[in-house]
Image (cartoon, rainbow, N blue to C red):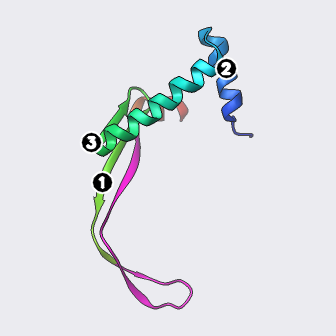
Amino acid sequence: MAKMTQSQMLDVLAKETGFKKSEIKNILEAMTDLALKEVKKNGEFTIKGIGKLVKQKRKARMGRNPATGETIKIPAKTVVKFRVAKAAKDSVL
């Protein structure tokens, strides 16, 4: 099964909404920028019916270098995770 490309997604959204592809692209870029700013500022960004981006802190831990087998310390860091909404899970599965 082939993945939908950005161009194909813009085509479908333009046909369904009546907007120009360039307008749809600008809206998606603005939404992406907004999502990243909100996650950085508030720790999460929700897209109703799809899921939410959540900023999460990871503790420092011990790991292993796969090439040498040497034990190494992995420092603590902040990561962004995506949690899928129940409605999205139910509709796909």
Please tell me the numbered disc located at residue 41. Answer: 3
From the image, state whether disc 2 or disc 3 is nearer to you: 3
Q: Position of residue 19 (x, y in %)?
A: 61, 11
Secondary structure type for disc 1: strand
Q: CA distance from mark 3 to mark 1?
A: 13 Å
Q: Which residue is mark 2?
A: 12
- Give the distance between the C-alpha atoms of the residues marked 2 and 3, in whole angstroms: 32 Å
**Labels 1 and 2 touching (C-beta < 8 A):** no
Q: Which residue is located at x 52 percent, y 28 percent? A: 28
How much space separates mark 1 and mark 2, taking CA atoms?
A: 34 Å
| Residues at circles 2 and 3 in contact by the CB criterion of under 8 Å | no
Observer-nearest of 38 and 22: 22
Q: Earlier in the sequence, mark 3 or mark 1?
A: 3
Q: Of the residues under marks 2 and 3, which one precedes in the sequence?
A: 2
Q: Residue at x 42, y 29 (%)?
A: 87
Q: Residue furthest right?
A: 2
Q: According to the image, label 1 marks what residue?
A: 56
Magenta residues span 62-83
